[in-house]
Structures are given as structure tokens and as C-alpha cells.
Image (cartoon, rainbow, N blue to C red):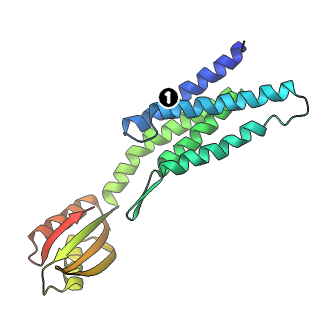
Amino acid sequence: MPEWVDIIKLLAAAFAGAVIGLERELHDKPAGFRTNIMICLGAALFTLLSVRLAEDAPGVDRTRIAAQIVTGVGFLGAGAIIQRRNHVVGLTTAATIWAVASVGMAFGAGHFVLGTLGTVLASAVLFGLGVTEKQIARWHTAATFEVELEPGASPRDTIERLVKEARVRRRSWTLIKTPEGLAGRLTAIGPAPRLEKLEHLMIRDAEIRAFKRL
């Protein structure tokens, strides 16, 4: 039978995973509530087993099994990262998985203060800085548009005029010739209200046949 202290370690790890995973679940992320609980609990259990097996075999490295947690978590994190068009999605989720595993290892090794501190800091970053990021994004964000132009339009002049009128910065502009005419992809940077203004300008502009914000 496991000792009571081992049960407390596993329960603490499961609770820590639940606290950190709550933010991911609320934002409908792939690695949500249950996933983070299982990662934290699994990391704690592997760490605990590593210590216990080493105690039964003197001279065996007690960190041997626990050291492989980092590798295993790396595969989970890589699976959460997706490259979609010009954007990489899932980096925060992957970093959260990595952090949750370290918290589980801390509890599994019996370092309750360290595990608790890691839980508090990780939760504070996910909950608190998420609000801060939204405020920053409102005043400095990027938007990508797929644009179709009318025949005879001057693509460069048209885009430069719209960008200047909306008071945003053009990060990239790629022009493509299609059987239907000219098309391109514009990435603009600026405050969210100005990017919305750019959309309205495109709607009203006679040289823009169609556009889509990605």
C-alpha cells in the first residue's frame, strides 16, 4: 500500500493540474482541464516511481525515469503546435504542458512549496497576462487580407493609398496574377480600430473587387 504522503503528493499534483488547466478549458484550448490534470498527475507518478524503484535497488540512479518525462512532454507539446498559413498556433498550450509537467515533478519529488509556487505563477501568467495581451493586441496587432482587384487597377498604388488612409503599417504585400485578374495578400499592422477602418475602406473602394480577412 502506498504511504499517505505519496497519496498527498498525487492529489496535490492533480489539483495543481486542474488549477492551471482551468484557464485553457475556459478558452477552449486543445489541452484543457482533463489533459492538464493527467499530465501533472502522470509526471508526479513517474517521479514518485523513479524514487521508489531506486530505493528498492541501491546504486540505481533515482532520477533515471523522471528524466524521461521531459522527452515525453516534448512530444505532447509538439503535437499541440500547428502552423496555419503564416501563423503558428498552440505555442502557449505547448508551453503550458511543459510547465504543468514540471509542477507535477515537483510534487512527485515531495517539494510542495516549489510545486505550489509553480502552480500559482503559471496560473497568474495564464489568467492575468491574458487580459494584458488583449489590451496590447487592441493597440498593436496584425491582420492579413486576401484581396482581389478590378482589371486596370494599379495594385501597389491602391494598397498604399488604403494603408496610408487607414494609418496602419504595411508589413507585407504579395501580388498574384490569376485567370480572373489580379489578387494579392496584404498583412497590415496597427491598432484594432484602424484595421477595422481599413476593412471599411476596402468595402467602399471601387478598385477592390473582393477581399477576405484571414
Residue sitting at x 55%, y 29%: 16
Question: Which of the image's four quarters has the N terminus?
Answer: top right
Q: Residues within 10 Å of mark 1 (few under 14, many from 20)?
A: many
Q: Is residue 125 left or right of residue 143?
A: right
Q: Is residue 198 left or right of residue 93?
A: left
Is residue 73 or residue 200 the one in the foreground?
Answer: 73
Residue bearing the label numbered 1: 18
Residue 115 in view here: yes
Residue 114 in view here: no
Q: Residue 30, image x and y in percent? A: 43, 41
Q: Is residue 150 left or right of residue 167?
A: left
Residue sitting at x 60%, y 27%: 13
On screen, residue 46 above or below 204: above
Question: Splitting the image into 4 quarters, where does residue 116 fall?
Answer: top right
On screen, residue 201 above or below 65: below
On screen, residue 84 above or below 66: below
Q: Amino acid at mark 1?
A: Ala
Residue sitting at x 50%, y 36%: 123
Q: Residue 12, image x and y in percent? A: 60, 23
Report the label total: 1
